[in-house]
Image (spheres, rainbow, N blue to C red):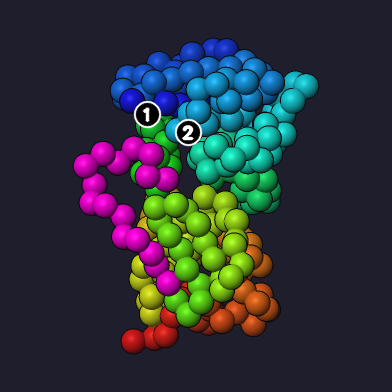
Amino acid sequence: MTRILIIDDEQDLVWAIRYALADEGYDVLTAGNGAEGIAVAYQSQPDLVILDIVMPHLDGIQVCHTLRRDQKLSTVPILFLTKRSSIEDRINGLNDGADDYLVKPFDFGELKARVSALLRRSGRNRPGTAPLISQLAYLDLCLDPRTHKVNVGSRDVLLTPAEFDLLRHMLTHQGQVFSSEELLTQVWHYPHDSKDQGLVRWHVMNLRSKIEPDPSKPMYLRTVPRHGYILGDTT
C-alpha cells in the first residue's frame, strides 16, 4: 500500500487530509512538527511527503533539506503546503527541493489530484504498468529510468525529481518542441489553464546548470524562440 506522510502543526487540517487520503486507499501517517516528521520519515520510508512550510522550531524548508540529504529519502516526492500564493514564493519552494506546491486553503479534490500525479510521476504508485526502458540518451547525456541516475559523459549528475521528470520527458520525445504550457500539463500534470509558466523557465534554468557544459549556450536542452524547448535535432 502506498504510504503518505503528513507533517503539519495544524491538527484539524491534518485530520481532514488524513481522512481524505485514507478514503482513497492510502496508508497515511502524520507528524505534528518538523522533528517528529523527520523521525517518522526515517522509520517509515514514505512514498510521498505532504509538508507544511510554516511550523515552529523546525520549519518545512529545513525538514525538506534534511530529507533530501538522506540517500533513501532523497527522491521521495514532497508537496509543500503554504498560505503564500505569489509566483516568487512558488519558485522559492521548488528551488528549496519541493516537487509541487499547494496554497492554503485548497480544494481536497485538487489535493488528491496533485498527490496522484506526484506518485504517478515518481513511479511509486503504478502497479501493472509496462516495464521501464533501460536507458535514454542523446549525445553523451544518459538517463536510466530504473535507477534514476543521470550522466553527462563520465560525470554523475544529481537532479531533483522535478528536473528528472523534465529531462526524461524531453529525452523520450527527442526532436519535438514543447511550449511551457505543454510541459506544465504533460510533465507535472498542472491544469491546462495554469498561469505558472514561470516555473518551467526556473526548472529549465536549473536543469541546464547541471547538464550543460555552458548553460548560456545550451547544446542539449535548447530554446526555440516564441515556441518553447527542444532536446535533440529537429525532424
Element under label 1? loop
Question: In which quarter of the view is residue 168 placed?
Answer: bottom left
**Amino acid on which the number 1 mark rests in the picture:** Thr
Neighbourhood count class around disc 1 (C-alpha, 10 Å): few under 14, some 14–19, many 20 upward: few
Which residue is identified by label 2?
48
Question: In which quarter of the view is residue 179 placed?
Answer: bottom left
Neighbourhood count class around disc 2 (C-alpha, 10 Å): few under 14, some 14–19, many 20 upward: many
Whether the magenta-drawn stretch holds residue 134 is answered as yes
Between discs 1 and 2, the one toward the N terminus: 1
Residue 202 showing in the rendered view:
yes
Which label belongs to residue 2?
Answer: 1
Residue located at (49% from left, 13% from top): 15
Horizontal and vertical percent position of residue 1: 33, 25
Say which of 149 and 166 sits in front.
Answer: 149
Element under label 2? strand
Horizontal and vertical percent position of residue 13: 53, 18
| Figure label count | 2
* 230, above or below 189, in the image: below
Horizontal and vertical percent position of residue 220: 53, 77
Residue located at (24% from left, 47% from top): 129
**Amino acid on which the number 2 mark rests in the picture:** Leu
Whether the magenta-drawn stretch holds residue 41 is answered as no
Which label belongs to residue 120?
Answer: none
Chief SS of the magenta region: loop
CB atoms of marks 1 and 2 within 8 Å? yes
* 82, above or below 189, in the image: above
Horizontal and vertical percent position of residue 71: 59, 40
Determine the residue located farthest toward the front in the rendered image: 154
Residue located at (59% from left, 62% from top): 156
**On-image quarter of the C terminus:** bottom left
Q: Which residues are magenta?
A: 122-137
- Measured Cα–Cα span from mark 1 to mark 2: 8 Å
